[in-house]
Image (cartoon, grey):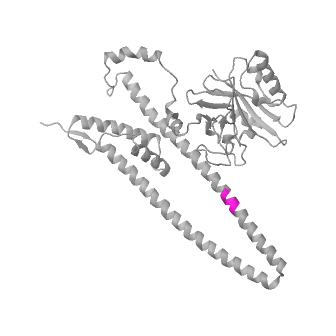
Amino acid sequence: MEEIYRLGKHEFATREEWEGAKRDLEKIETIVEHLDIDDPEVAEGIYHYIREGKVEFESKLGTAFFCDISDRVAQNFEYKLEKTKKLERHRLRREKKEAEEEQKKLKDKEKQQSQMFKFLGISCVVLAVLCISFYGFSVYRERRATRKLEEVQQQRNISQALDWYADRIRSEANTGGDNAPETSGNEQESEPEQETERTLEVLPEYSIIKKQYPDFVGWIYINDTQIDLPVMQTTDNAYYLDKDANGMEDVNGTLFLDCRDDFVKPSTNLIIYGHNMKSGAMFGGLKQYLEESYLSAHDRIEFDTIYEKQTYQIVAVCLSDVGDEGAYRYYNFIEAESDEDFNAFLTNIRSCAVYDRTQDVTKSDKLLTLSTCNNYVEDGRLFVVAKKLQ
């Protein structure tokens, strides 16, 4: 009697097709478990990953899943298109109505006022239009920057989910699971040689981001804050002050590591810069560290380089006036050349510290400094110093 291979409502002619369908099902379950496919942005991200071959399927089960994702993306596109049309029609009607009302007001003024008042009225209208245009453009740029950050964060989330699945498969292989691939004796003998030649490799969750953004060097995260952001590094510390991760003009800028820092070695003090935005974006939330209760609840900083996961604990919160000629330039402390150099840094940050636990710091510690502007004086700076937890 011919054996029938079934998986749910699907039947397969051969065992190979059935096994391929099982592997596809595991991939699909992993994606659905860790990502919200009902979220249009997530569905679109998964669609592109499958379309570009970053996620591959072996059976009609995978094809059916891809078709489902494609339908979701298509429906979302149609919804966005219809919504855009409605907004455009509404905007045109509103602008037409506003233009008619404005025209009527101008005609009334022509009857009641002199030529001078007419001129002033027109000037005010032009100025108002310019201000609204400038405000609208600023909002657009900020929203565009937010979308760009969300795209990078989405790439990281998808990479983490797929890497979780890859780790699971590797774990099953190492423990001799049902799906473990067969390993020849030659491959087993070659492992020690590969280990000796091992070089630094980009962490799996950052490999895709690194390929898309060559300047990407790490990711900083502080729990329960807006700081969940990529960090860049170039040879010019001014480059990312007004540019996003793609190098496009952006008023928020992008977080960046001091160009003098070596994050591989690493340097004694890694310094990350970011703008103090009123919206709270970038390092706009660092000013809350001036409150001890907030500091106590958010004293851990996770800063992953592309090669290593790292956790730091805050040891100092400081205010400095870099406009003062005699002020200590904390941002010039990159590498401790001697014990005296390291102790001088600690002494100076203690002198401007709002919060100080540097007594817990030793010369063997690796430090992380988050630096932003602060308007308590004209050239004020707020910076947070943390030490790496071993």
The residue shown at (42%, 53%) is 72
One can see residue 87 in this view: yes
The C terminus, quarter of image: top right
Q: Quick check: is 28 in the magenta stretch? A: no
The residue shown at (63%, 56%) is 140
Describe residue 90's horizontal placement relative to residue 160 as left or right.
right
The residue shown at (42%, 14%) is 193
The residue shown at (78%, 29%) is 330
Predominant secondary structure in magenta?
helix
One can see residue 291 in this view: no
Q: Percent position (x, y) of residue 37?
A: 45, 47
- Viewer-proximal residue among 133 and 358: 133
Residue 133, above or below 157: below
Point out the stretch of residues depicted in magenta.
Answer: 133-137
Residue found at the far bottom of this picture: 111
- Viewer-proximal residue among 243 and 84: 243
Q: Percent position (x, y) of residue 311?
A: 62, 27
